[in-house]
Amino acid sequence: MAAAKAAASVTRDASGNVLADGDAVVLIKDLKVKGANQTLKQGTVIRSIRLTDDPEEIDCRHETIKGLVLRTEFVRKR
């Protein structure tokens, strides 16, 4: 049962690559950031991601936005 939970909680990017803490990812589409009145452009590199309890979301930082949470469907491992 523990193996089933571990397999279910694997975080993957849009291409199916497994993500880990500290990885760098690239945005695959332009994203409007709520509350920041800013758009992150496609191709923007986000470094040092952190995994969350939800395998569909990652926690990260950008130079201008702190506490950014991105959906894994919009990123690709670099």
Image (cartoon, helix red, strand yellow):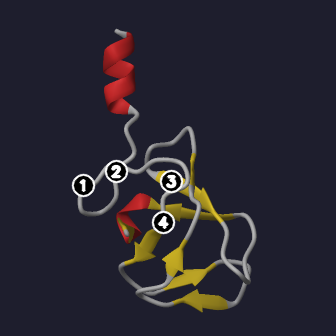
Q: Residue at x 39, y 70 (%)?
A: 74
Pointer 3 residue: 57
The residue lying toward the viewer, choosing from 72 and 61, is 61
Alpha carbons under labels 4 and 3: distance apart:
14 Å
Residue 12: assigned label: 2
Give the crowd class for mark 3: few <14, some 14-19, many >=20 residues within 10 Å.
Answer: some
- Residue 37 location (% of width, % of height): 70, 90
Residue visible at 42% across and 88% down in the picture: 42
Q: Nearer the viewer, mark 4 or mark 2?
A: 4
Secondary structure beneath label 4: loop
Q: Nearer the viewer, mark 4 or mark 1?
A: 4
Label 3: element kind: strand
Do labels 2 and 1 touch, CB within 8 Å?
A: yes
Horizontally, is 12 left or right of 53 in the view? left
Mark 1 against mark 3, which lies toward the viewer? 1
According to the image, label 1 marks what residue? 16
At numbered mark 1, what does the secondary structure look like: helix, strand or loop?
loop
Q: Is residue 21 above or below residue 69?
A: above
Quadrant showing the C terminus = bottom left
Identity of the amino acid at label 3?
A: Glu
Q: Are discs 4 and 2 less than 8 Å apart at CB?
A: no
Q: Position of residue 34 (x, y in %)?
A: 65, 77
Q: Is residue 75 left or right of residue 50?
A: left
Label 4, on which residue?
A: 24
